[in-house]
Amino acid sequence: MSGINSAWKTLCIPAKIFPIGMASVILFNFYIGQYARMGANALYLVVGTGLLYILCAFNMEIVAWILLLLPVLFFLSLIALLIFDLSLIDVTHTFQKRCYPHSVNGVPPPSCDSDHSA
């Protein structure tokens, strides 16, 4: 047990954060019964922690932090783009002239040929 404790103390912070996050993913896979994915994630845990440890051993802790935070940054940017896109839908539907081919609730649609500005 002291060997594991001393090995844990030699890890840099990104190499400590990654196995904790992956262990939670593995436990979740175990909980929902995806055992094949659990094995693949266990392999990712070992390889990823080793990669982060090697980067930190060669004094490239900044690169280790970037690799650790890259998926989080991609996820946050996708959410920001989704929110931005959904906010633009209201703007384009408000200012764009829309012509619908079918009536809604019995109300006839406006004609695409008629000019409603008069």
Image (cartoon, rainbow, N blue to C red):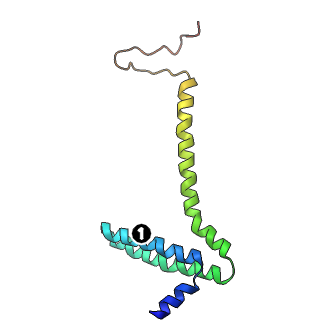
Q: Quadrant of the C terminus?
A: top right
Q: Residue 75, image x and y in percent?
A: 53, 56
Considering every residue shown, the one lying at the far bottom of the view is 2
Q: Is residue 10 left or right of residue 28?
A: right
Residue 31 percent location from the top left of the image: 31, 69
| Tally of numbered discs | 1
What residue lies at 57% left-to-right and 69% top-to-bottom?
Answer: 68
| Image quadrant in which the N terminus is located | bottom left
Q: Nearer the viewer, residue 12 or 30?
A: 12
Q: What residue type is labelled 1?
A: Val
- Please tell me in which quadrant of the rendered image residue 42 appears: bottom left
Q: Is residue 21 left or right of residue 37?
A: right
**Vertical placement of 23 versus 57: above or below?**
above
Image quarter of residue 94: top right
- Looking at the image, residue 33 sits to the left or right of residue 17; the answer is left
Which residue appears farthest toward the top when viewing the image?
118
Specify few, some or many for label 1: CA neighbours under 10 Å numbering under 14, 14-19, or 20 or more.
Answer: some
Q: Mark 1 points at which residue?
A: 25
User: At 40% from the left edge and 20% from the top edge, which residue is drawn?
Assistant: 102
Q: Is 116 placed above or below 96 here?
A: above
Q: In which quarter of the image is residue 50?
A: bottom right
User: In the image, residue 11 lies at what x, y percent?
Assistant: 57, 82
Q: From what the image shows, is residue 64 above or below residue 53?
A: above
Q: Residue at coordinates 53% horizontally, 43% vertically from top-left?
A: 83
Instruction: Tell me where residue 103 appears, x and y as whole percent.
Output: 38, 18
**Left or right of 114: which side holds 35?**
left
Residue at screen point 55% across, 21% down:
97
- Considering the numbered disc 1 on the image, is that residue within a helix, a strand or a loop? helix
